[in-house]
Image (cartoon, rainbow, N blue to C red):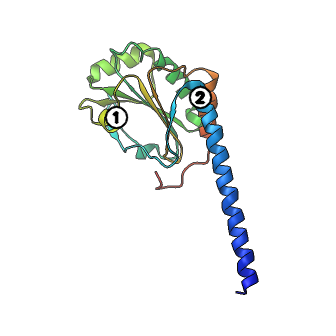
Amino acid sequence: MTPRIRLVVAACCIFALTSTLTAVAAERQALAELLKPLNVSAYPSLMHPPDFSGLTPDNRTVSLASLQGKVLLLNFWASWCLECRPEMPMFEQLHREFSAQGLAIVGINAREGTSTIRAYAKELGLTFPLIRDSSGKINSAYGVIGLPTTFLIGRNGRAVALAIGPREWSGQPARALIQALLDEPPAMKGTR
């Protein structure tokens, strides 16, 4: 390769890298703007959440790996948590509206029994998966210190945002954030 061709190739590589970095920066800025109205904390772009696996009251296994390629709204809750209760119907509505587009909503219960979880789900008409975390292992892995706590995880498996305390998940800001995450391309197999 001649020095001139090397120079052209190097210039093309620098241009491509600069364009990619500019696009990533713009994407991060747009996401940051979507997070502000919900008052949620953003994560660094390469942070990945801990893996988990748990059973629903009907003994179905749900794991982070099984949700690969989906946008995940992971909510930590308990039936005794008064601030958790108003969020649940909002999550159910989001589940019904966006699950076909790739949104997965999973509730992780904090140390309650199967009958309590079933009764709560029936009373509120919840159809998204609720996982028993009777030992608190999943809560601990995620560093949950208060309820409700909600994590948003992108299609590519990266941790996007964290909300400690209740939020207005049925409002336009939450819907815009979820839609923006759903519009991202799915992760390649085996990358989460």
Residue extending farthest to the bottom is 2
Which residue is the site of mark 2? 36
Is there CB contact under 8 Å for labels 1 and 2? no
Name the quarter where the N terminus is drawn: bottom right
Please rate how many residues cluster around mark 2, counting C-alpha atoms within 10 Å: few if below 14, some from 14 to 19, many from 20: few
Q: Which kind of residue does numbered mark 2 sit on? A: Lys
Vertical order, 46 against 7 (above or below) = above
Determine which quarter of the picture holds residue 102. top right
Q: Residue at the spot x=27%, y=36% of the render?
A: 137
Along the line of sight, the residue nearer the viewer: 5 or 94: 5
Up the image or down, 28 lies above or below 14; here it is above
Residue 192 appears at what percent x and percent y? 46, 50
Rendered residue at 59%/39% (across/down): 181
Corner quadrant of residue 32: top right
Q: Which residue shows up at 61% across the image and 43% down it?
A: 28
Q: Spatial distance from mark 1 to mark 2, Cα to Cα?
A: 22 Å
Looking at the image, which is closer to me, 171 or 98?
171
Query: Viewed as shown, does residue 134 lie left or right of 70?
Result: left
Occupied quadrant, residue 150: top left
Instruction: Residue at 65% x, 44% y: name it.
Output: 27
Q: Amino acid at mark 1?
A: Gly
Mark 1 = which residue? Answer: 143
Residue 81: x and y in percent read 36, 16
